[in-house]
Amino acid sequence: MTEIKGAAALKTKIANKEATVVVIGQGYVGLPLAMELVEAGFKCIGIDTNQSRVDQLNRAESYIFDISDEQLKNAIDRGLYSATTKYEVVKDADIVSICVPTPLRKTRDPDISYIQASSTSMAPFLSGPVLVILESTTYPGTTEEVLVPLLETGNCKLDVDLFVAFSPERVDPGNAKYGLKNTPKVVGGVSEQSTELITAFYTEVVDLVHPVRSSREAELVKLLENTFRAVNIALVNEMAMMCDRMNIDIWNVIEAAASKPFGYMPFYPGPGIGGHCIPLDPSYLSWKAKSFGFYNRFIELATDVNGNMPQFVTQKLVRVLNTHKKSLNGAKVLLLGVAYKSNINDLRESPALDIWQILTKEWGADLSYHDPYIDRIPSFDASSKALTADLVSSADIVIITTNHKGVDYDLVVEHASLILDTRNTLPDNIENVVRL
Ligand SMILES: NC(=O)c1ccc[n+]([C@@H]2O[C@H](COP(=O)([O-])OP(=O)(O)OC[C@H]3O[C@@H](n4cnc5c(N)ncnc54)[C@H](O)[C@@H]3O)[C@@H](O)[C@H]2O)c1
């Protein structure tokens, strides 16, 4: 197949690092991506509809844990990064990357309205040849069926001067070992030329690019990865509930099973799953599969098991208090760690929020929390309290919901009357400590 002119011109610009990249959505995914593109030598403009975020970014104030103010300032000072709310900048873009949210509606159906809104806003400004990349997690078919028709309402036509591809964002916030650069980047275009272009682009940015045959395959890769995690976490959560009944320590069992050097990969139980990915992504897949008359029973089961862990933690709390002749109604409960996982400042979908809600609304408990990464929980109008001997000793029970590094657990053990450890933070031989 002879290469068409538009794609050839774009490839040359990419190879010479002369391509300007616009990244739409400057959140947990979009901002680190923009910084990595700057590191690779590309000029990058971030678009976000949130004016205060844009102002903050232009003042070189990062709100993303993995990006420092210095890194942001350096990118701005070198003239390689700026942020704006104005879609007009798409006129100058050779590549556009979409990193907007893809939440679920209350009915757990996919909400792709942010993808639609950003595509509609950019379409009139697209000026070919241009490569548009969707990075937001979504169901197979979105790039081809939703994105392309919306983009083609502008002046560009697919495979003439418009190329469209999907590449899943695989970032693991707070992971010091694997970032965007050294995590292989899966890419798949809606056409052969689109796949070639996105491969050429990301080859300039990351260590390893893994092209697949279509955007649908690339979309499914992300959902397979996160469904794998959701199902395996559900399996150990179910094992933990069974072990609770059988009076066996699940943590010791997992540690021993993990000593097998092949055929086993440890997953750990906990108070529930959180974040923007694992609790949501599998539902994107099962929703789409249903339109093919296919029902993903593993996904439904995992959603059910993981979603009920906060209730299980509550029941265990009631039993622990009961053995000490205490009632949960009116009890002072201190949550240690409310972020959805350790060492990050992300509260989204955190199981600690469900536990808080259940304990206060259903059981009449008196809640407070300490989290060095989360100053406030706006939805409960609560602020993190300083971790003092007084705070710990005044609680009837402490629940370790998230085990951040740097928390003084010795102080907690010394002063707490009871501890429910849902994360295997403390050794199993301490009096008054009950593990999940
Ligand atoms: N956070 C993660 O760890 C992670 C990991 C992998 C994939 N993802 C996926 O990446 C996508 C983005 O997630 P995130 O965590 O970065 O979300 P986020 O909420 O942190 O950031 C999204 C940003 O997009 C902006 N925005 C919304 N609508 C817009 C529009 N029409 N135009 C311009 N900006 C708009 C918002 O103001 C916000 O700043 C989602 O699909 C998510 O599932 C997230």
Image (cartoon, helix red, strand yellow):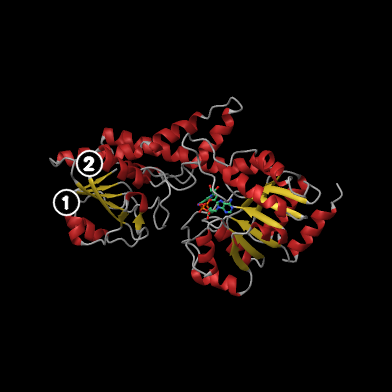
**Residue at the far top in the pictured view:** 293
In the picture, measured across the screen, residue 133 lies left or right of residue 261, that is right
User: Measured from the top left, where is residue 123 in percent x and y?
Assistant: 70, 50
Q: What's the residue type where badge 1 is placed?
A: Ser
- Quadrant including the C terminus: top left
User: Measured from the top left, where is residue 51 in percent x and y?
Assistant: 53, 60
Disc 1/disc 2 C-alpha distance (Å): 20 Å
Q: Mark 2 sits on what residue?
A: 364
Vertical placement of residue 281 versus 300, above or below: below
Between residues 202 and 58, which one lies in front from this camera angle? 58
**Residue at the far left in the pictured view:** 325
Q: What's the residue type where badge 2 is placed?
A: Gly
Label 1 crowding class (10 Å Cα cut-off): few <14, some 14-19, many 20+?
some
Between residues 276 and 269, which one lies in front from this camera angle? 276
Q: Mark 1 sits on what residue?
A: 417
Q: Identify the image quadrant of residue 252.
A: top left
Q: Identify the image quadrant of residue 34.
A: bottom right
Looking at marks 1 and 2 on the same chain, the residue that comes earlier in the sequence is marked by: 2
Does mark 2's beta carbon lie closer than 8 Å to ligand 1? no
